[in-house]
Image (spheres, grey):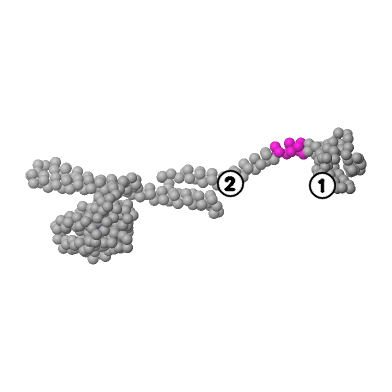
Amino acid sequence: GVVIYRNYCLGLDSLIAPDEIAYDTTIVTTTWLNGEQLRAAVYRDKNFTILVAYSLNELGDVLENLFSILLYLIPIAVALSILGGLYLAHKALAPVHDVTTRARKITAENLDQTIPPREVDDEIGRLVNTMNDMIHRLHNSFAQTRQFSSDASHELRTPLTIIRGEIELALRNEKTPEEYRTILSSTLEEILRLKSIIDNLLTLGKADYGVYDMKLEEVHLDSLIKDLYDDSEMLAETKHIKVELKKTEPVTIVGDKGRLRQLFLNIVDNAIKYTPDGGHVAISVERHNGSALVEVEDSGIGIPKQDLDKIFDRFYRVDKARSRQMGGTGLGLSIAKWIVELHRGTISVKSEINKGSKFTVRLPIN
Ligand code: ADP
């Protein structure tokens, strides 16, 4: 066997024990005569052996050099990547910082302001749009609450002013018992109105907080409507209004009986209130396409087209004076709408001035 190593030839057996080498290419590490470490690739055949080797000492030198280079380079590379990372993070987060600063400046007092939208449609652009939508919703909600508080105070102040006036009148000079009775009954009327407004406000307050616990039970809508019809006949009698029960199909739904009664009472009560003497009101209950369908139709004063979608708003009244005169608070239909929504139903109205109105309530049959 021959070793070819940097033009030196040497007996192979003196370097590598023959049993270390298989009949194929083998990589071995061995020691040169001068003690130098060698990495050798040996190819062995029956007739000859080729060995190619290089000194591991040289490799060690190279590795040592590489190590000292890395020793200097790594901290520089780490420092550079930290600086680069900080720069990139700062650049990427600058718009977020900007949005945060602007968002912080928006309070309940300036909800009409928005965060300037970004030209680019990236994540931050979408975040800004979402925040602006939210600010817009908050703005509307604050405006509604303010409107509601101011309407509520106004509504509560009116009966109180009247009560005060009545009492001052009663105290001004001596009156006959008959006069006192008149004043007291008028005062009582206003107190009842106050109570009705407060009850309705409390109901709507519960609706707003979403804390209302429905007392669910099986409700036979046909019998509920029949009972209501009996009561409404009495209401209508004084105005000579004919109330008719047009259709009563047996329909059972799962719902809150007390609230459902309040819902239909509000609608029937309105039908009688806003129908002139001698008119008529027709009530019907039936099943229709998997829903309970309740209709209340009157031959009353009707509702102008432009007011149709507003009558379910709180305190909205087409004719304030007329509603007041009828003992209305302007909250009946908003409560009706809340109860319908509580039962996952819908309420709609069709109306023609001086011909009449038709309220339709659809409630799903569970
Ligand atoms: P109110 O206490 O004033 O009756 P509602 O919320 O029940 O309040 O109704 C709101 C307004 O809708 C009423 O003031 C009235 O102008 C109108 N309205 C409701 N029902 C009828 C009806 N059947 N016919 C004509 N107008 C109606």
Q: Where is residue 133 drawn, in percent x and y?
A: 45, 51
Mark 2 in CB contact with mark 1 (< 8 angstroms):
no
The residue labelled by disc 2 is 92
Residue in the picture at 54% in, 45% down? 96
Residue in the picture at 24% in, 61% down? 249
The front one of 51 and 98 is 51
User: Compared with residue 83, is residue 291 higher up or lower down, i.e. above or below?
Assistant: below
* Residue 28 as seen in the image, left or right of residue 180: right
Indicate which label's residue lies in the foreground, 2 or 1.
Answer: 1
* Residue 249 is at least partly visible in this image: yes
Q: Where is residue 293 drawn, in percent x and y?
A: 28, 60
Q: Where is residue 147 drawn, in percent x and y?
A: 33, 49
What residue span does the magenta drawing correspond to? 65-76
| Ligand 1 contact, mark 2 (Cβ < 8 Å) | no
Disc 2 marks a residue whose amino acid type is: Ala
The front one of 277 and 146 is 277
Residue in the picture at 17% in, 55% down? 231
Q: Main secondary structure of the magenta part?
A: helix
The residue labelled by disc 1 is 24
Quarter of the image where one finds residue 18 = top right
* Residue 139 as seen in the image, left or right of residue 62: left
Disc 1 marks a residue whose amino acid type is: Asp
Callout 2: few (<14), some (14-19), or many (20+) C-alpha neighbours within 10 Å? few
Mark-to-mark CA distance, 2 and 1: 59 Å
